[in-house]
Amino acid sequence: MEALQNNQLSLIEATCLALIKQGATHGYDIAKRFHPDGDIGEVFTQTNPVVYRALKSLEAAQLVKSTDALGVRKQLKFALSVTEVGGQVLHSWLNTPATHIRDLRTEFLVKLHLRELVGMKQKKFISLQRDALSQVLSHLLADPSRSAVAMWRREQARAVARFLDELAGEELPASSNADREDTLRLSARNQLRAKVISVKHGGVLSTVKLELNPGQTMTATITREATDALALAPQTEVLGLCKATDVLVARR
């Protein structure tokens, strides 16, 4: 009980709690959502007995409560509802980003779906998730080892970074029309044409200084890998993409 109330919910328990909060009141209705053809089961599949055990744990921890209710055929059923403490625990869990890359496949995707169901805004949470994994990603990308495990982890880190960037609306997709190579489809606002003044490399990150107009400059911090991929060097013409907290760099 203490572990659950200290926001140490398992994924199955937290998901059940969110579904009850969203309006699911009966055990079987909740369990169906975890079937392969259910909205939760698409990402996180569980059997009925596992779901029922999770519901019992939630009730034992006083995060949900059950009341007698009549079913469709007048049979006695138990209707579930979230307690005040359960609502607080759920809100905290839904706002806590995953701490491991491996958890993005289930925990993060489930949280995104559940947040949408209960009407929570996503943009800030996605930003929190990126921040939570930034050091982990930097560490993996900086590993020079050529072992199969290290190479796999680097590729996984790159995929995660691209996924989170695209989810945040900052991906720079190539034009689908091969005959229009000079067309960039950008989602970030405040696009500014600039010229690279200097590039300073660190272990993982590079600092790129850009000149917009004579005497008007801005600085972008991007991965060294991105700097190399864009072949950035002094006098290179680029596009600076500004958002609230960052400057991104694109090149034709």
Image (cartoon, rainbow, N blue to C red):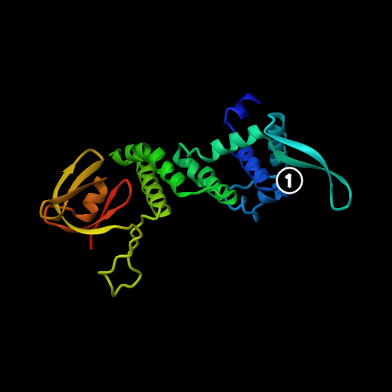
Residue at 53% from the left image edge and 43% from the top image edge: 107
Left or right: where does residue 116 sit relative to residue 182? right
Q: Tell me the residue at 73%/45% (across/down).
A: 25
The answer to whether residue 10 shows anywhere in this view is: no
Neighbor class of circle 1 (other Cα within 10 Å; few <14, some 14-19, many 20+) is some
Measured along the vertical axis of the image, is residue 57 above or below residue 186? above
**Direction from residue 181 to residue 34 in the image, left or right:** right
Residue at coordinates 32% horizontally, 58% vertically from top-left? 189
Instruction: From the top left corner, tell me how far across and down residue 195 is, in percent.
Output: 15, 56
- Where residue 72 sits in the image (x, y, percent)? 85, 53
Quarter-wise, where is residue 59 in the image? Answer: top right
In what element is the residue under mark 1? loop
Give the residue at the far bottom of this rendering.
179
Farthest residue in the top direction?
Answer: 2
The front one of 77 and 174 is 77
Residue at far right of view: 74
Measured from the top left, where is residue 50 in percent x and y? 69, 40
Query: For this rendering, which residue is in front, 159 or 87?
Result: 87
Rendered residue at 73%/49% (across/down): 29
Residue 113 in view of the camera: yes
The residue to which callout 1 is attached is: 25
Q: Quadrant of the N terminus?
A: top right
Quarter in which the C terminus is drawn: bottom left
Q: Position of residue 87 (x, y in %)?
A: 62, 37
| Amino acid type assigned to the residue bearing label 1 in the image | Thr
Q: How many marks?
A: 1
Left or right? Give the position of 11 relative to 61: left
